[in-house]
Image (spheres, helix red, strand yellow):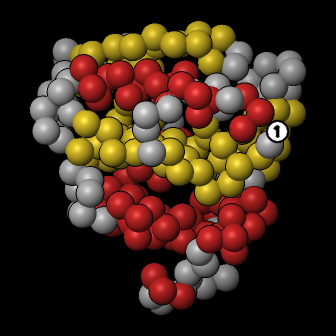
Amino acid sequence: MSAPQTPQDLPQGEELAALVSARLEDIPEFPKPGVVFKDFTPLLRDPAASRAVVQDVVRRRQGDVDVVVGIEARGFILGAAMAYALGVGFVPVRKAGKLPGETHSASYTLEYGTATIEMHKDAVVAGDRVLIVDDVLATGGTAAACVSLVRDAGASVVGVEVVLELAFLAGRKQLEDIDVVSLVVQE
């Protein structure tokens, strides 16, 4: 499948949501029993679909963002592409112990345990308008911890963009004051 030549040719709205849904794969019992992992790597293999996802965010966020923050690890993939397309910088938020130098950290609970994420202390600065990107919004713990990291650095969060929201886990409740956009919502 060849990629469309212009952003205007790319699917939007319900057509984009259907395309994304068709490219997501359920992996049962991963990373532990009882969890159904939502794999979006088939989406990345489809150049038209992944380009459409990036361009959808660019249409919505162009001119409103100074920095894109991608959450490890799948948020790195789309977040970096979105930052490039928006013409802004990219900052990775990583699991504890993965970044060199001084970091801010935040701990949180997720649907199958607890974790800590970190961001370099100088990654965002006061006044930066930050867009946070990840693949899935589940319980909201990771995204809320990332919001906390950004705000602790003095920057503002303009929104959170995810490919898939698992609404039955109510993660949006942890982000009530944030503009959250999900391409696909599973009830």
Q: Position of residue 77 (x, y in %)?
A: 47, 49
Location of residue 50 by image quarter: bottom right
Is 46 located above or below residue 104 in the figure? Answer: below
For the question of whether residue 156 can be seen, the reply is: yes
Residue at figure coordinates x 62%, y 18% from the top left: 110
Q: Quick one: label 1, few (<14), some, or many (20+) residues within 10 Å?
A: few
Is 66 located above or below residue 72 in the figure? Answer: below
Q: Position of residue 82 (x, y in %)?
A: 39, 58
Is label 1 in a helix, a strand or a loop? strand
Residue at figure coordinates x 72%, y 38% from the top left: 167
Location of residue 122 by image quarter: top left
Q: Position of residue 140 (x, y in %)?
A: 57, 27
Residue furthest out toward the front: 177
Amino acid at pointer 1: Ile
Is 59 located above or below residue 101 in the figure? Answer: below
Is 151 located above or below residue 49 in the figure? Answer: above
Q: Relative to 113, is 134 on the left or the right?
A: left
For the question of whether residue 77 can be seen, the reply is: no
Seen from the viewer's position, the closer of residues 184 and 80 is 184
Residue at figure coordinates x 64%, y 25% from the top left: 139
Residue at figure coordinates x 69%, y 74% from the top left: 15
Looking at the rendering, in which quadrant would you find the C terminus?
top right
Q: Relative to 130, is 101 on the left or the right?
A: left
- Reading the image, the residue beneath label 1 is 27
Q: Relative to 176, is 35 on the left or the right?
A: right
Total number of numbered labels? 1
Looking at the rendering, in which quadrant would you find the N terminus?
bottom right
Q: Position of residue 151 (x, y in %)?
A: 27, 26
